[in-house]
Image (cartoon, helix red, strand yellow):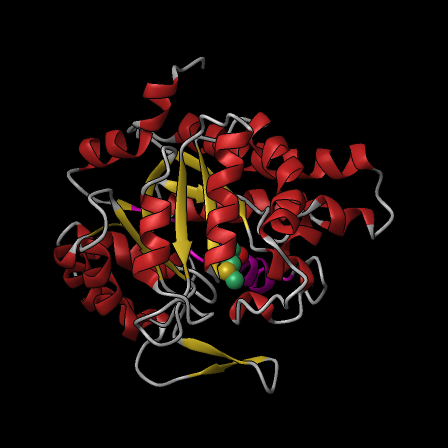
Amino acid sequence: MDWTAEEKSNVVEELLRENGGWAVIDGGLATELESNGADIRDALWSSKCLFTCPELIRKVHLDYLEAGASILITASYQATIQGFLSRGFSQEESEALLRKSVELAVEARDIYLQKCPQKRQILIAASVGSYGAYLADGSEYSGDYGEYVTLETLKEFHRRRLQVLVEAGPDLIAFETIPNKIETQAYVELLEECNIDTPAWFAFSSKDGVNIVSGDSLVECGSIADSCHNCVAVGINCTPPRFIHDLILSMTKITKKPILIYPNSGESYDPEKKEWVQSAGGSAEDFAPFVNKWHEAGASLIGGCCRTSPDTVRAISRALKGGA
Ligand code: MET
């Protein structure tokens, strides 16, 4: 469909209007692929599935739609041209893999809508993971890229990837797990410099309920995102549920745009051990009682991140419909 820039930028508001003020985002993709048998222990993480088991990605997208999600996030979180090149793919093949992530989500939407008696709006959000996700050294959870990584390094790293994803025609761009201010700034400048009119959301992660993981201020980073012309929603992802309420309250002070949250199942990243440790009070099953409080506090787009599943999404959907 050929939409004007203004129509494109209204897709989230339109979805929220159609749905009565809230919408459900899908749940964890990589961890759900793993639960379905995919081996993602790899520097490419879930994006490895783009060439090893694309049909499984399509299946997981479909499972999330059947569970009630209205927004699908593509399998491009850790998909980067640099990452694919280092595995022996050519530039063309690498770009095709990026496009494939969007195509698979679009296919899942088409299959779902064909058999769904009640037509509903479904948006495809092209995931852009941080530079640290590409490095796969834990820096996506510390935001510490060292002194040699500048704003220009980050813009150069993301530029072509962003252009290719946009050309594949997603409804939205999902900047996910943003760890620091410099990368927030890089995304905002790239959208402008590349004349991108696809709307974008900015999702930060936090490990203390106050700042984003690098220690940079959520208020400051959220405000940078909020001031970006393309930005249609600001929020939090991959963060333990127990921090979410306070983070929503902080964000209501800096944005009038829709607030999105998709927490993980309660784990935190231990930089010493370089692994995720489960913490008490916030498993995916515990989501449902919080969901309406989060919505009342100001979040309108709600889903799950790592280690959440279609069951989590079903519970979120039920709770928002008033059935929890
Ligand atoms: C570490 S955050 C990962 C986000 C990504 N959309 C996923 O669920 O796989």
Which segment did they paint magenta? 24-37
Residue 26 at x, y percent in the picture: 40, 50
Residue 138 at x, y percent in the picture: 61, 71
Q: Which quadrant is home to the C terminus? A: bottom left
Q: Is residue 103 left or right of residue 73?
A: right
Q: Residue at x 57, y 81 (%)?
A: 271
Q: Residue at x 59, y 69 (%)?
A: 139
Q: Is residue 194 above or below residue 185?
A: above
Q: Is residue 289 above or below residue 79?
A: below
Between 119 and 18, which is closer to the camera in this rendering?
Answer: 18
Q: Residue at x 66, y 47 (%)?
A: 157
Q: Residue at x 73, y 44 (%)?
A: 81
Q: Which quarter of the picture shows residue 23?
A: top left
Query: Quick check: can you spot residue 29?
Result: no
Residue 265 at x, y percent in the picture: 40, 71
Residue 1 at x, y percent in the picture: 45, 15
Q: Which quarter of the picture shows residue 275?
A: bottom right
Between 174 and 278, which is closer to the camera in this rendering?
Answer: 174
Q: Is residue 48 left or right of residue 109?
A: right
Q: Is residue 270 left or right of residue 216?
A: right
11 magenta-colored: no
Between 241 and 188, which is closer to the camera in this rendering?
Answer: 188
